[in-house]
Amino acid sequence: MLNKLMGRKKSEQVDKEKSLDFSSENIPKHIAIIMDGNGRWAKKRGLPRVAGHREGMNVIREIVSTSNEIGVEVLTLYAFSTENWKRPKTEVDFLMRLPERFLNVELPKLIEENVVVRITGERENLPEYTKRAVNKAVEATKENNGLILNFALNYGSRSEIIDGIKSLYKEIEAGEMDINEISESVLSDHLMTANLNDPDLLIRTSGEIRLSNFMLWQLAYSEFWFTDVLWPDFSREHFIEAVRVYQNRQRRYGGV
Ligand code: V0D
């Protein structure tokens, strides 16, 4: 079955719109995105890096609404890694204001669109204003039951796994668990993503072909899609293209 988002028949579609032609079967339930290339986008235009971050923030709206529209269940966006603290202080300060800026405009719409906002990462060490903004969004959307918009914020996968092991150890030490009970699913349940399915599809923009300490455990069986497009230039069409590639891969494997 084919969805025609532009309301055209396949034969009528011009090249640009081909990317909107996708199947409503086999939609990836969980899509994770490494939103890379914001600084490079700005540099190319002779703008400060933060201008790229601001532009990148604006792309999120379109990807959230498209995800909602095609029936994605979880959208995880890598917003800030534990390594990103090493960036210049002015840039970090700017980035830490973005959740507030994003949510001031978007939170009413997210509530309206039945989106659930979640955070994966260490919230403790964030500035107060960042914590306040994200906590408010999580609280205000917790009764919704639509798309889960999961921001990976101050997140690093190796330290997440270490923390998971520590919490397992504590349960064993307290006699609540036996070492022989440890399994893949038990460790999964001790990670920050405990009640989310693993991503079906990972998208990384901006041409880097690496994971950069992002969801190492959770991405074990995921499909990967990389594009040279910089995040601020990433559009609904690129997103649908990634979904289509995912669906074609699923179809091929399913046929064997
Ligand atoms: C910069 C491109 C939205 C990637 C997107 C603090 C890097 C724009 C948020 C956001 C960032 C986070 C949590 C939340 C609501 C919005 C965001 C950061 C960076 C790092 F609940 N965009 N965004 N957070 N960028």
Image (tube, rainbow, N blue to C red):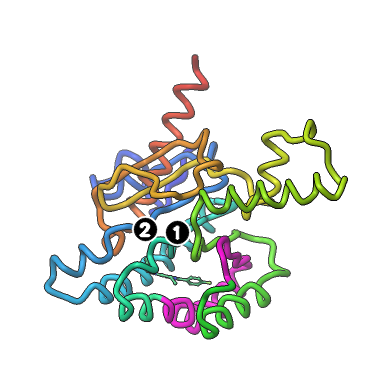
**Residue found 66% across the figure and 77% down from its top:** 140
Residue numbers of the magenta segment? 96-123
* Picture quarter with ligand 1: bottom left
Residue 250 in percent (x, y) is at: 48, 29
Q: Amino acid at mark 1?
A: Tyr
Q: Is residue 141 left or right of residue 26?
A: right
**Residue found 44% across the figure and 22% down from its top:** 252
- SS class of the residue under badge 1? strand
Q: Amino acid at mark 2?
A: Met
Question: Height in image: 255 above or below 192?
Answer: above
Residue 14 in percent (x, y) is at: 24, 47
**Foreground residue, 19 or 72?**
72
Ligand 1 is within 8 Å of the C-beta of the residue at disc 2? yes
Mark 2 — residue? 35
Q: Residue furthest right?
A: 175
Q: Is residue 149 left or right of residue 168?
A: left
- Which quarter of the figure has residue 143? bottom right
Q: What is the CA distance from the residue labelled 1 to the residue labelled 2?
A: 6 Å
Ligand 1 is within 8 Å of the C-beta of the residue at disc 1? yes
Question: Height in image: 173 above or below 230?
Answer: above
Mark 1 — residue? 78
- SS class of the residue under badge 2? loop
**Residue found 43% across the figure and 43% down from its top:** 243
Q: Earlier in the sequence, mark 1 or mark 2?
A: 2
Residue 249 in percent (x, y) is at: 43, 29
